[in-house]
Amino acid sequence: FNITSNNVTLDCKEYTITYANSSTGYAVKNFGSNSSIVKNCYIQQGYINRTVSFAVYFLNSSNSSILNNTIVTLGSASTGSTTSNRGIMFVASNFSTIANNRINSTGRDGHAVLLSRSSNANVSSNIIRTQNRFTYGVYSLDSLYQTIFSNNITTLEQSSYGIRITISTGKADYNNLTSNLINTSGSRGYPVYLYKTNNNTLAGNIIQTNSTLTEGIYLVGSSGNNISSNNI
């Protein structure tokens, strides 16, 4: 599905979208349209060996919502095999809502939710599970003022983080991480990883890890953060 106009609602009414079956591709794509809604869809990647295929991909979109969907992305478990198949990816998109979705990602570098160069997103009440290396539940890159609230996030492999907020070329400050349940396993599987991001609030999160060489909340080059009432 390619959304090309403002104010479009795609309501699948629990029907299935199968994507990336015969070639690399996206289930739902929106490049530049605003106030879009995608809801009640079961989105399933069709073929395990496709790469760089995203279930939902929004670019330059504002005030859009991804609600009550089930998303399954695939990928090889072979060491060194990177598929980069993401669940929900927003790039340069502001005031987005990602809520009440169930996302299962099995591919390496197949982040469940990726927010890049975006601001003011609300990521809440999602159930997220990742099952391969270097795969994050929620990954916020060069993004500001994100609210990540009441999500249930499980990661099962090495170097896979529950929530990662970091910078590459921009800023990633003033984010609110509240009341999330995060469980990680695998070496260096940090539940919360903050890299050069400042003035964030982390409160009321329940953090569990069976990982080795891992802290519950890991901060690198970050300052001015309010961290309180977390159960680690």
Image (cartoon, grey):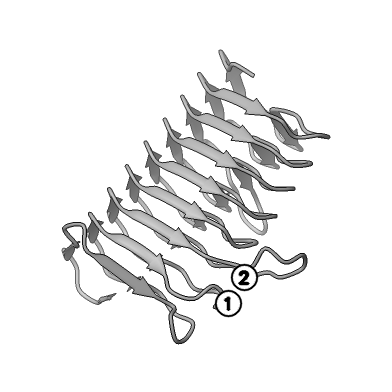
Cα distance, mark 2 to mark 1? Answer: 8 Å
Look at label 2 and name its amino acid: Thr
What residue is drawn where x is 54% and y is 78%? Answer: 50
Question: In the current view of this chain or complex, which residue is farthest to the top?
Answer: 229
Question: Measured along the vertical axis of the image, is residue 175 above or below residue 5?
Answer: above
Secondary element at tag 1: loop
Circle 2 residue? 83
Report helix, strand or loop for mark 2: loop
As rendered, which of 168 and 54 lies closer to the eye? 54
The disc label shown at residue 8, or none: none
Determine the image quadrant of residue 31.
bottom left
> Residue 200 location in percent, x, y?
56, 31
Mark 1 closeness class: few <14, some 14–19, many ≥20 residues within 10 Å: some
Q: Nearer the viewer, mark 2 or mark 1?
A: 1
Q: Residue at x 63, y 61 (%)?
A: 109
Query: As rendered, which of 101 and 174 lies closer to the eye?
Result: 101
142 sits left or right of 39 in the view: right
Q: Looking at the picture, how far across and down is residue 130, in whole percent? A: 56, 50
Q: Which residue is mark 1?
A: 49
